[in-house]
Image (cartoon, helix red, strand yellow):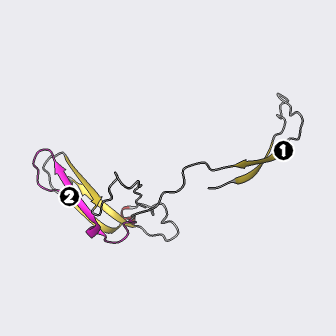
Amino acid sequence: MTGPVTVTATVAPATDGSYVVGTPATSGAITRVDSDDPPETVIWSDNLRTDTSANWTKLFATTNGAPDDETVDWAYDYSGILVPPAPHSELSGDTHGLHMTVNKNDTQLAAAALNSIPTARVSAATTPCALTCT
């Protein structure tokens, strides 16, 4: 919930008699105010449900010079691996997203990492922002 919300709280005596409620009245209205920071301005988002690979830069790294051993599947239907819809997808039932693996395609032992970063970057020094992938 956001914004002010009015609730009514009622205080009653304990059923075991360990305390009693005095006067004045045993109920009253309380206003809860959401004092969090205001919502940020969304400057870029991607729900990853379609192939948006042109908007992303893939980075693969290994510490021992092993060959590139990764897969990236855009608009991957993850219902086939028994993963439920992502948050905010429950109404549409969409089960598509980005599926990435590393170190799964060969038997060579290697320490490796795989990342994807947005190709269009925003300068954090001049523009305050929050990146949210939903």
Q: Quadrant of residue 20?
A: top right
Name the spot of residue 28 as percent of width and height, x first. 82, 46
- Is residue 1 in view? no
Name the spot of residue 63 as percent of width and height, x first. 14, 44
Q: Quadrant of the N terminus?
A: bottom right
Q: CA distance from mark 1 to mark 2?
A: 62 Å
- At x 40% / y 60%, what residue is drawn? 133
Name the spot of residue 38 as percent of width and height, x first. 54, 54
**Left or right: 106, with 119 as reference point:** left
Q: What type is the residue that disc 1 sits on?
A: Ser
58 inside magenta stretch: yes
Judging by the rendered image, the residue that carries numbered circle 2 is 70
Q: 51 or 55, which lies in front?
A: 55
74 inside magenta stretch: no
Judging by the rendered image, the residue that carries numbered circle 1 is 27
Q: Residues within 10 Å of mark 2 (few under 14, many from 20)?
A: some
For the magenta stretch, what is the residue range?
A: 46-69
